[in-house]
């Protein structure tokens, strides 16, 4: 006896035997009963869901001479008999994948002119219609729009988006659904019973999941598994035959992660990889598993699990142990791993780090530098530095946060010196101002807005990153050093508004000096720069008075004398000076015959 694969042997012969397309088959049966038939139909959907099968059943029912009350073909009349014996002259099938030229379409159009010899209609089934060329589509358009009264077209395709909109507008479109796992399992049970094959429902669930919504694929895999298992389809043999990762691994990983057993997870991962499975496949399967556990927590989402009844119970049991934040964080980590997996040069390490992070989600926070938890956030580190540099008994401005151009170490040293030199003006405890991270640094927008509003005594003040002290809260005759002056000068230059950016850049290269305390002198290169500084000299003086806590400070500006100007030496002149001070440099140049670049 000739062997026939299950996908052909158990192909539906009536609308009632079609699996998973109840709405579509009901619509087609009603159309046959009422006789209200369109001239063109388009069946579209994924592979293996019954598009061509339904087209053949529909074509047979259309030409049936004695259709049943439900709209099914009788299978007894001459038209049905000729169709079943594949000798019908009224039903034509064309594979557009191999007959996609204009000549093939023209030949088909010529056949439409001949009326049917038996029955009412000539039915033309064009499979994979999206494979037709553009010229063939255009040749097909006119006939499709106004076909003869005895012609009905049934088009089938898996890629509807490739069909011209002018074709779509002339057809009744039926979108076929993917097969659910439950429908696939039930149909596989029926086939197994007909074939006398014993099975485990969990094994059929693996086959249905592997088929990815296609019944034809499911029946093909079923035949393969039945051959491997020799009539007894078990779960272990199916996953071995199909090389599918056992779902038990996913349950173990989640259980171990809840208990923070990182070592056991690493051992399990090594076993999975040694069996030939890819780490990315493990992460994808684990993400789907966690998603199912999340769905199993709520009775409303429980029907979303497309698994067997036995597996649904296992998901519910594990869902009771898992908290929702853990599942959310685990899904986020695995999604990030899946995104980075393809670009990673060390894929196994990426998978291991992801599993370690998942296992540490429920781990309580530990103290100490060697706790092995996530690194400290920069936010908390900055807060600690601010508290350390904040004076305990004064609200004078903190200079350490005012000059981002100065390095951290240098700023810390200068800040510590300033804090030591400052003394409180009152014994009354002053409430410590609240400092937030928004106060660290500044933006030009902030500077411009502050530069317009910050005034004191009718004089504009170069704005700072913290609140200015009032006259009652600060000293007015404090001592300051050259280091303090240079620091506040640089800080002031960094805080100057955008419109003074040019002069601020030049001021950074100047070195103010204390001539006779508290008089301060600034030496400039030429008269033009002196005039620019004198325009804002009052603001500069008032700013230095406030931040150096000395209201008697006076600023003077003068142009450097000729002898004070430093000559810029060329490279040759620099080398000559070095050779004059250190003769060994000249000897080295002569010994190696070096040339000045």
Image (cartoon, rainbow, N blue to C red):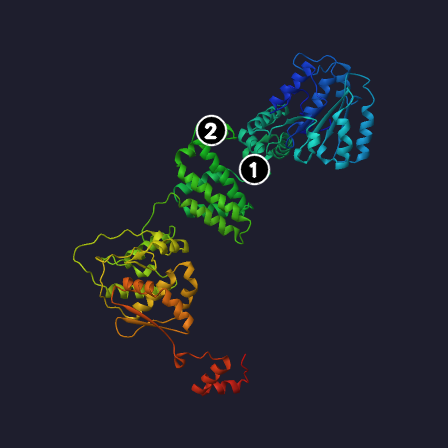
Please determine whether, in this image, residue 308 is positioned above or below residue 505: above
Task: Indicate the position of residue 430 as horizontal and vertical percent values.
Answer: 21, 54
Q: Nearer the viewer, mark 2 or mark 1?
A: 2
Task: Indicate the position of residue 287 as horizontal and vertical percent values.
Answer: 49, 40
Instruction: Please name the residue that numbered disc 1 is placed on.
Output: 239
Nearer to the camera, 385 or 488: 488
Please determine whether, in this image, residue 180 is positioned above or below residue 14: below
Q: Judging from the image, what secondary structure is the residue with disc 1 in?
A: helix
Question: Looking at the figure, which quarter contains the N terminus?
Answer: top right
Question: Looking at the figure, which quarter contains the C terminus?
Answer: bottom right
Q: Is residue 133 visible?
A: no
Q: Is residue 575 visible?
A: yes
Task: Indicate the position of residue 212 as horizontal and vertical percent values.
Answer: 59, 34
Instruction: Please name the residue that numbered disc 2 is placed on.
Output: 302
User: Which numbered disc flags the more N-terminal residue, 2 or 1?
Assistant: 1
Q: CA distance from mark 2 to mark 1?
A: 25 Å
Disc 2 residue crowd, few under 14, some 14–19, many 20+, Cα 10 Å: some
Residue at horizontal 30%, vertical 63%? 542
């Amino acid at each position: 006896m000739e062997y026939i694969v299950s996908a052909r042997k158990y192909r539906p012969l009536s609308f009632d035997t079609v699996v998973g397309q109840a709405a579509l088959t009901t619509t087609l049966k009603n159309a046959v009963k009422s006789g209200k038939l369109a001239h063109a139909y388009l069946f579209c959907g994924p592979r293996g869901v019954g598009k061509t099968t339904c087209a053949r059943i529909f074509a047979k029912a259309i030409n049936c001479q004695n259709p049943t009350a439900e709209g099914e073909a009788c299978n007894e009349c001459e038209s049905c008999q000729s169709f079943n014996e594949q000798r019908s002259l009224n039903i034509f099938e064309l594979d557009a994948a191999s007959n996609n030229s204009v000549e093939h379409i023209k030949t088909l159009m010529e056949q439409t002119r001949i009326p049917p010899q038996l029955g009412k209609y000539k039915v033309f089934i064009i499979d994979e219609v999206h494979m037709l060329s553009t010229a063939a589509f255009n040749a097909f358009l006119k006939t499709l729009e106004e076909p003869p009264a005895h012609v009905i077209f049934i088009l089938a395709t898996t890629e509807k988006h490739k069909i011209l909109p002018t074709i779509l507008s002339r057809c009744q479109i039926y979108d076929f659904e993917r097969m659910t796992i439950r429908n696939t399992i039930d149909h596989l049970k029926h086939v197994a019973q007909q074939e006398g094959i014993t099975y485990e429902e969990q094994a059929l669930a693996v086959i249905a999941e592997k088929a990815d919504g296609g019944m034809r694929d499911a029946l093909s895999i079923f035949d393969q598994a039945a051959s491997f298992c020799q009539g007894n389809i078990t779960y272990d043999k199916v996953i071995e035959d199909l090389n599918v990762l056992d779902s038990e691994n996913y349950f173990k990983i989640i259980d171990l992660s809840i208990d923070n057993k990182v070592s056991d997870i690493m051992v399990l991962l090594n076993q999975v990889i040694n069996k030939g499975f890819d780490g990315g496949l493990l992460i994808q399967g684990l993400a789907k598993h966690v998603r199912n556990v999340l769905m199993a927590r709520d009775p409303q989402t429980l029907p979303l699990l497309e698994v067997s009844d036995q597996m649904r119970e296992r998901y519910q049991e594990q869902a009771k142990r898992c908290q929702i934040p853990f599942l959310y964080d685990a899904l986020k980590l695995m999604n990030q791993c899946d995104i980075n997996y393809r670009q990673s040069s060390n894929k196994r390490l990426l998978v291991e780090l992801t599993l370690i992070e998942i296992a540490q989600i429920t781990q309580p926070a530990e103290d100490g530098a060697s706790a092995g938890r996530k690194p400290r956030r920069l936010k908390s580190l900055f807060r600690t530095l601010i508290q350390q540099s904040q004076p305990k008994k004064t609200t004078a401005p903190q200079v350490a946060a005012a000059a981002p151009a100065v390095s951290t170490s240098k700023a810390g040293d200068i800040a510590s010196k300033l804090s030591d030199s400052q003394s409180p003006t009152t014994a009354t405890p002053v409430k410590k101002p609240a400092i937030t991270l928004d106060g660290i640094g500044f933006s030009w927008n902030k500077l411009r807005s502050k530069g317009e509003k910050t005034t004191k005594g009718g004089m504009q003040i170069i704005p700072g990153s913290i609140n200015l002290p009032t006259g009652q809260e600060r000293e007015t005759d404090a001592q300051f050093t050259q280091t303090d002056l240079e620091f506040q000068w640089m800080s002031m230059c960094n805080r100057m508004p955008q419109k003074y950016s040019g002069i601020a850049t030049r001021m950074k290269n100047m070195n103010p000096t204390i001539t006779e305390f508290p008089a301060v002198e600034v030496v400039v290169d030429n008269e033009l720069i002196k005039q620019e500084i004198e325009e804002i000299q009052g603001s500069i003086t008032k700013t230095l008075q406030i931040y150096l806590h000395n209201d008697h400070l006076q600023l003077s500006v003068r142009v450097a004398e000729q002898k004070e100007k430093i000559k810029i030496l060329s490279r040759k002149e620099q080398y000559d000076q070095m050779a004059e001070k250190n003769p060994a440099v000249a000897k080295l140049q002569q010994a190696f015959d070096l040339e000045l670049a």
